[in-house]
Image (spheres, rainbow, N blue to C red):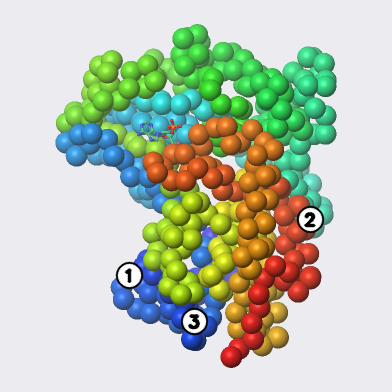
Amino acid sequence: LNHVADRFDLRPDIRFDTRIASAHFDEAKGRWAVRTEAGETIDAKFCVAATGCLSVPNEPNFKGQETFKGPTYHTGRWPHEGVDFTGKRVAVIGTGSSAIQSIPQIAKQAAQVYVFQRTPNYSVPAHNGPIDISVAEAWLANRDENRQLQKMSSAGFLFSNPREELATQVGDNERRKVFEERWAQGGFSVQASFADLSVDPAANAMAAEFAASKIREIVKDPAVADKLTPKDYPFGTKRLCVDTGYYEVFNQPHVQLIDLKETPLDTITATGVKTTGGEFEVDAIVFAIGFDAMTGALSKIDIQGRGGETLKAAWAEGPKSYLGLMVSGFPNLFTVTGPGSPSVLSNMIVSIEQHVDWLADLMGFMTLNGLATIEPTADSQNAWVDHVNEAANHTLYPVANSWYLGANVPGKPRVFMPYIGGVGAYRTLCDAVAANGYMGFKLRPAA
Ligand code: NA7
């Protein structure tokens, strides 16, 4: 991304360290008044919210946390200069992607690591490492074709299309072989081992059992392996974690897993973390407790559309949009990778690119045709919201208490936010909408 910013000389157009406090649509002018926290107002025809899906960290709210004497860190706000844990005793609270990626790194330095786990996650190896030159050359030799395949794939990765076979319809040996191959390949390819993993509980249970067998293989202490194994939600329905040496780290004598389901977290004290099972003295605490996903950043800005309606009110029962791009009543406001688009269920760069290209075309179309505003009709929005829900309900995803559903933020409406129909299918649809004169949108000429 830095390369892109430099290559296209984008930095002069970016105002850093500028926080937006409000964005109000002026109906008479058909324009947005966007105010910074410093009090400056920017007048704009279009307002593109590229505010990120995982950009607002959940604030820790543990009893006694203010009494803790040592430093605390949030994985969502990690100091850019890095942290030196050499010789320290460290508590990590949370076991999502951020914890799973950071615990092996922290354990390299720390004298003692206590991992406080409320819910175990499924994690597959990343197999990160230097890219062999032959791999890079093979990519470049078919660059355009590869980019096209990626754009039309299900999740924006070349390998993300699930195999067509069903896990339930192949023999045990064949199934194991495929899972092993995908595990060796690493990352999200495991989730795409078979076509039925995210829709059929029986197939999903096979993937879950394979993952459990890997945990048992890696973690020497069977009791610890058992605690690390998820039991109450289907494989891949919380964001699959991707790690480098996560399970292995629990074989090290200075790393201890504390199961908060057995012994819940009670308080944070001046010197450590207390559970109902005992107190763990530490020098530092890492909160790896996640984000107010997908809607968090937008809900922090006072956004008002037509008639002063707030986005907060429009989304009180969960986010509603047409194509995850626009909200009815909020003309010329766009949500890049917003709820209702494939977004976090995809390679974000590919999805951001798709939205930005689509928006650039739209803005060109509006300028060329002397159009002042665009917004979705209420009908097209309702139909899209229904479709997004229907698509999610065909899968096992809504079963898990994931941040995809807002389940990690108390009081947040339980709505499956991303669109699960796939990156390629979604792109085709967005292109068809544009080709048909922006079907489902109201376009109005300048007054
Ligand atoms: P996640 O995936 O939301 O993980 C947060 C973790 O913190 C998860 O294990 C939570 O357990 C745990 N948590 C949250 N609140 C508490 C409290 N109060 N007590 C104990 N444990 C708690 O966030 P990440 O930052 O790891 O990853 C977010 C995304 O970033 C990731 O999915 C990738 O897309 C990149 P819980 O499961 O709620 O029981």
Residue 187: name its quadrant. top right
- Residue type indicated by callout 2: Gln
Residue at x-position 54% and y-position 20% = 231
Residue nearest the observer in this picture, 194 or 102: 194
Q: Are marks 2 and 3 in contact (CB under 8 Å)?
A: no
Say which of marks 2 and 3 sits in front: 3
Mark drawn on residue 27? 3
- Residue type indicated by callout 1: Glu
Secondary element type, mark 2: helix
How far apart are labels 1 and 3 at the CA level? 23 Å
Q: Which residue is the site of mark 1?
A: 37
Residue 20 is left or right of residue 274, and the answer is right
Q: Position of residue 59 (x, y in %)?
A: 33, 45
Q: Which residue is the site of mark 2?
A: 148
Residue at x-position 61% and y-position 72% = 375
Q: Position of residue 310 (x, y in %)?
A: 43, 66
User: Which circle's residue, 2 or 1, is located before the other in the chain?
Assistant: 1
Secondary element type, mark 3: loop
Residue 172's place in the image compared with 91, above or below, is above
